[in-house]
Amino acid sequence: MLNILGKAASINVRKVLWTCVELALPFTREDWGAGFRATSEPAFLALNPNAMVPVLRDGDFVLWESNSIIRYLANQYGGTRNPAWYPAEPRRRARVDQWLDWQAADLNRAWSYAFMALARQSPAHQDAAAIAASSRDWGHFMGILERRLQETGAYVAGEAFTLADIAIGLSVNRWFQTPLDSALRPDLPAVAAYYDRLAERPGYREHGRNGTP
């Protein structure tokens, strides 16, 4: 059975939990991270020297980095159940990888400061200019997603749900759950429709659109 280390409120842990639901994979989970066992403990650092959640243990195989974990699960367990999830054909797979990497490198970096300030009320993230800049950057990248969803009419990699939608869907949940200044929140009808489309999936209702940004 899979063992997932990380608290359930973590957006990156929730990627892994949602993936497990989609693939009907049984798992156990241990609470690690802020408010629970410290990831600075030697036992955790032996698994992930970055002291970050999630960590996956699959027997004697240990893996960290959330997007790497969900790729592994799709490769290891998803083939016959849902081969379109993470296609074997190189160009189709590259499209999925493109959006997975965009979510981690561009979208998440944009929303980080605004989210910590407005949703988490972090005392270390209360600079008004930085909040406004992060909010504008977040809106810019959400605009890119809006145009992409207008093109596909469905999901980020095309007409079918893929692994990329798990990572991006959780970031979209943060967009709608964070109390941004209305002047800095553009109207994104295709993203809103995508948000509702994802909510038809039990794994997203449980681990994505569940009131936890």
Image (cartoon, grey):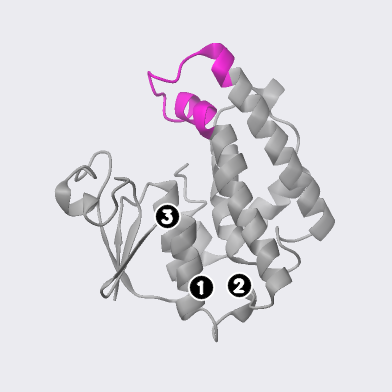
Say which residue label 3 marks: 65
Q: Residue 50 vs residue 173: left or right?
A: left
Task: Give coordinates of residue 106: x percent, y percent.
Answer: 61, 41
> What amino acid type is highlighted by mark number 3?
Glu
> What amino acid type is highlighted by mark number 1?
Ala
Front-lying residue, 127 or 191 = 127
Q: Residue furthest left?
A: 42
Badge 3 marks a residue whose secondary structure is: loop
Front-lying residue, 127 or 63 = 63
Count residues near mark 2 (Cα–Cα under 10 Å), then give few for <14, some for 14-19, many for 20+.
many
Task: Give coordinates of residue 148: x percent, y percent.
Answer: 78, 51
Badge 1 marks a residue whose secondary structure is: helix
**Which of the marked residues, 3 or 2, is nearer the chain's N terminus?**
3
Place residue 62 in its image quadrant.
bottom left
Point out the frontmost of discs 3 and 1.
Answer: 3
Badge 2 marks a residue whose secondary structure is: helix
Is residue 6 shown in magenta?
A: no
Front-lying residue, 207 or 114 = 114
Quarter of the image where the N terminus is located: bottom left
The total number of labels drawn is 3
**Which of the marked residues, 1 or 2, is nearer the chain's N terminus?**
1
